[in-house]
Amino acid sequence: MGKKVALTGNEAAAHAIRQINPDVVAAFPITPSTPIPQNIAQYIADGKMDTELVTVESEHSAMSACIGAAAGGGRVMTATSANGYALMWEMLYIASGARLPIVMAVAARALSGPLNIHGDHSDIMGGRDSGWIELVAENSQEAYDNLIQAVKIAENKDVMTPALGAFDGFNISHSIEIWEMEDDDKVREFVGEYEPLFPLLKTEEPVTHGAWAPPDWYFEHRMSQLKGLLNAKDVVVNVGKEFGKAFGREYGIYEAYKMDDADYVIVAMGSVCGTTKDVVDSLRDNGVKAGLLKLRLFRPFPYKELADVLSGAKAIAVLDRVSPAGAQGGPLFNEIRSALYDANNRPPVINYSYGLGGRDTQPVHINSVYDTLKKIVETGKVEKQFDCLNLRGAWG
Amino acid sequence: MAEKLLDWNEVLIGATIKDPGNSRSYETGSWRVERPVWNPDECIQCMFCWVYCPDSSILVDENGKMTGIDYDHCKGCGICVEQCPKKSKALTMLLEADAKGKSEEEIRKEAFSK
Ligand code: SF4
Ligand code: SF4
C-alpha cells in the first residue's frame, strides 16, 4: 500500500526517480530543480538506489551524457529548469532524433533576462518543438505520477521518444503538499524492465548511432521521428489507464473539470488549474456555468480531442504562462484556436499571459477572466483578444 | 554498393545504422581540390600519416606497411603531408587538375555535371 506523505514537488520527483532506479542520471544543479539531483545523490549515498550519477559541468554536458548512456542501452533520467534546459537545447533535438527514451523532470521556470529564478513556462514552451513528449502537472501528486508514467510512455516500442514531466517552479517544486507515495516494488513493477532497441554496448550486434543524414535521407528520418512522437498520444491514454488500475489514479490527455454543460471555459496547464478549480466551484455555487479544461499532454498536441471537448463552450479563455513573444498570442492559445478552426461551432477565444517570473495568480484574477467571458457572450463582442493577468498598467 | 533510398516508414528508428562501416560507400574523394602524392622511395614507413588521416585514407597492407592513398575517400586536407617527417619528399600536395592533366575549368565542369 502507498502512504500519504507531506513533501515538496521536487521531493516527489526525486522519490519517483529513486523508485524507478534508472541506470544513469546525469544532471547539473539549477534552481528550482536542484533538490532533485541533490536528493538522488543522497539516496545513492544511503544505498537506497544504485543509479550511476554523473555529475557534469553543465546542462549541455548533462544531456550529452544522458544521450551517450541511453545510446549505450541504459534507462536514463535527468532534471533541470530554465536556463539549464536552454543550455541543453541542441542536445534535446539529438536525443529525440536518436529516439532515446530519456525522461526528464523539469521544474518549469522563467528564462532570464531580466534575471529571474521563479516559475513560468518559458523553458518548456521554448523547447516545445524539440521533439520531446511534454506532460504538465497540476500538483506534486501529478508530478510524481507523471514521471512514473513518462518512463512507460517514452519506452513504448511505437514511441521510443524522450519525455519530460514538467511542474511549476516554486508553486509546486518548493511547496509542501500531501500526496500519495506508492510502494517501491509496485512502482518498479509498473515501469518494468527496459529493453533498448539498438544498444551500443551489445557488441555482438554492432550499430552506429548519430551518423549523418544527407539531404536524401534527413527528411525521411525526421518524419519517421514525428510518427513516434504522434504515437505517444494513444500510449499516454493507455498508460494513464494502466496507472489507474495499479494505483487508483487514472490519467488522460486532459482533465475536463465541470465541462459537461460549461458555457465559460478556461484552458490552462499547471498549478494555476488548482486555483481555477476553486473559482469554478464558487461560480457553480452561484449558478454560473463555468468550466476548466486542464491540459496534461502538450506534446504531441491533441488538437482533435481538444476541439471536440471545447466546441460546446460559448466563450473560451486560454491562459499562457509565457509572453506571446511577438506571436498573435501564447503558444497554447494559438494551438487551441487553430484546433477550433475546423470545429462546427467556433466559440470566441481570448488569451491571457499570467504568472510570468513567479507573479502570483489569485482567485480574483481568475474571476476576472470568467467575468470577461460572460461579457463576451452577453455583448457578442471581443474587446481584447489578448490581455495580461495581474500586470501593473492596462495592457495595449 | 548502391544503397536503396528507403521511404520514411521504412528507415530504421533513430537513424540507426545496422551495417557499421557503410560510410565506405560514400565517396568523399570527389570534394578534393588538391591531392597528396606518395613517393614510396622516400617513405620511411613511420605511419604518422596513417595515424593522423581523419578519413582512414592511407592504405596499408597486411604487414602494416603503407601501400598508397585511397583517392575514393581522401578529401585532400593535407594533414598527412603536414605530419610526414619526410614531407615534400615522401608526401607532396598536388593540384587535382595537374594530377589529372586537366584544366581547373574542366575539373569544375565534371564536378557540377554529377
Ligand atoms: S590529404 Fe587528408 S584525407 Fe587525404 S590522405 Fe592525407 S590526411 Fe587523409
Ligand atoms: S608519414 Fe610520410 S614517411 Fe611516414 S609513413 Fe606516411 S608517407 Fe611514409
Image (spheres, rainbow, N blue to C red):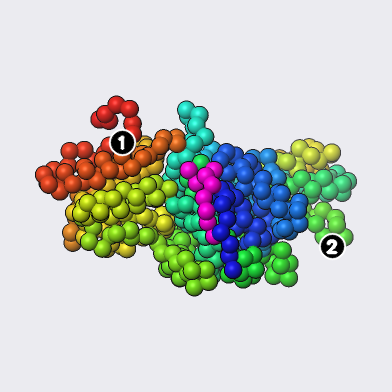
The residue under the point 33% across, 45% down is: A319
Which label number is shown at residue A388? Answer: 1
Q: Horizontal placement of A231 versus A331: left or right?
A: right
Q: Quadrant of residue A314?
A: bottom left
Residue B60 seen in the figure: yes
Residue A269 placement (x, y as % from top left): 39, 50
The residue under the point 71% across, 53% down is: A43
Camera-nearest residue between A236 and B99: A236
Read off the chain for label 1. Answer: A
Whether disc 1's CB lies below 8 Å from ligand 1 is answered no
Residue A298 placement (x, y as % from top left): 41, 54
Camera-nearest residue between A129 and A143: A143
Question: Dot 1, crowdedness within 10 Å: few (<14), some or many (≥20)?
Answer: many
| Residue that label 2 marks | B62
Q: Is residue A362 above or below residue A222?
A: above
Camera-nearest residue between A194 and A265: A265
Does the magenta-highlighted stretch encompass residue A214? no
Q: Which residue is farthest front? A: A285
Does the magenta-highlighted stretch encompass residue A176? yes
